Image (cartoon, rainbow, N blue to C red):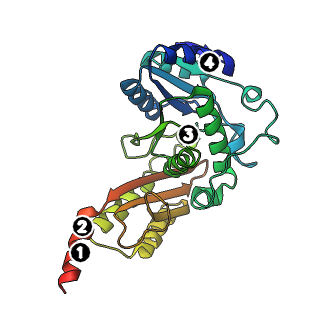
Amino acid sequence: MNIYHTVSGLRSDIRARRLNGESIGFVPTMGNLHEGHLQLVRQAKAQCDVVVVSIFVNPLQFGLNEDWEKYPRTFQDDAKKLETEGCDFLFHPDENEIYPNGMADQTRVVVPTMTDILCGASRPGHFEGVTTVVSKLLHIVQPDTAIFGIKDYQQLAVIRRMVEDLCIPVDIIGAPIARDFDGLALSSRNGYLGEDERPRVKVLYEVLCWCRDQIENGERDFTTLEIQADKTLENSGFRTDYVSIRNSKTLEPAAHDDNQLTILGAMFTKGARLIDNISLTLGEVNALTQQAEAKK
Ligand code: PAF
C-alpha cells in the first residue's frame, strides 16, 4: 500500500492505473477505522481494480463547539488495518494540502434545503463542510465508484444530490450499517461513551425498530410514533435530538402513501451525539391498502 500526503503524488499514480484500464474505487474517511469502514473498503475491493482510501479529519465540517480537536486520530493503526484489507493507495493530506488558500477563502459547495433539516438543524454548516470536502476529494481522486456508509443517511442523500446536480461522473454506493452485538451502529464516536451508558444506548436502534414494526403493521400516524419514540429515549436518560419518519429520497416528512420510508434518529448522551436509521419499503402493503380502499 502506498501512502500519499500530496494531491500531486496521489493523482499521478492514480492516472497511471487509469491509463492501464483499471477502475478506481474510493472510500473517504476521517480515520479511527472500525469494522464499518473496513466493510466499505472490502466492497470497494470487490467492485474496483484499485482502492483508494482517504483519511482527513475535515475541520470545515465541525462546528465551533464540536469535537474536532478531540476527534480520535489513530493513523498508524488505521494504516495497518488498510494494508491488511488490501487497500492500494492511502491519502493522508494535512489541512494546508486540502485548503491551501485557507478555510475562510475556500470555495464552498452548498446543497440547499435538505441540509437545513435533521442533523443540519442541530449542526449548522456541517453539510456545507462535508459537500465541500467530498467534492474536492472526488475531483482529486476522480474515482469510478465512491462508497459511503448508510449510517450517515442524510450525508449520503446530500452527497447523491450534489453529484447529480453538479454532474460529477461517479457512482455513489451506500453500504449497509455495521452494528455491534446489541444493535448499536458502529461509529468512531462510540469511543466517547461512558461505561455506564454503553449498555443503554442500544435504545436508539430499538426505538427505530419499534417504529418500523408499527408502520409495517399498518400504523400511519407518523407524528404519534415520533412522539412516543422521543419519550422512550428521554425515559432511558438521553436527550432526543430527533426521531423522524421521512421520504427516503427527498428526506421530506413521509406522506401516508410514500413507499420508501426512512426512520432517522439522533440523541445526545453525556459524551456523544449518536445517529442511526432504518429504511423500509412499503410497496406491497400500500398497494393492498389502496386496492381495499378502491373497492369501498
Ligand atoms: O463520513 C465521514 O467520515 C466524513 O463526513 C467524510 C465523508 C469522510 C467527509 O469528511
Report the residue marked by disc 1.
Answer: 289
Q: Which mark is residue 10?
A: 4
Judged by depth in the image, the label closer to the viewer, 3 or 1, is: 3
Going from the N terminus, do you reach mark 3 or mark 2 first? Answer: 3
Where is residue 114 drawn, in percent x and y?
A: 57, 59
Element on which disc 3 rests: loop
Going from the N terminus, do you reach mark 4 or mark 2 first? Answer: 4
Between 284 and 14, the one nearer to me in the picture = 14
Callouts 3 and 2 close, C-beta under 8 Å:
no
Between 128 and 74, the one nearer to me in the picture = 128
Report the residue marked by disc 2.
Answer: 285
Q: Which mark is residue 168?
A: 3
Q: Residue at x 48, y 50 (%)?
A: 153
Cα separation, mark 3 vs mark 1, equals: 40 Å
Callouts 2 and 1 close, C-beta under 8 Å:
yes
Amino acid bearing label 2: Val
Amino acid bearing label 1: Thr
Between 270 and 64, the one nearer to me in the picture = 64
Crowding at mark 4 (Cα within 10 Å: few <14, some 14-19, many 20+): many
Element on which disc 2 rests: helix
Between 59 and 34, the one nearer to me in the picture = 59
Crowding at mark 1 (Cα within 10 Å: few <14, some 14-19, many 20+): few
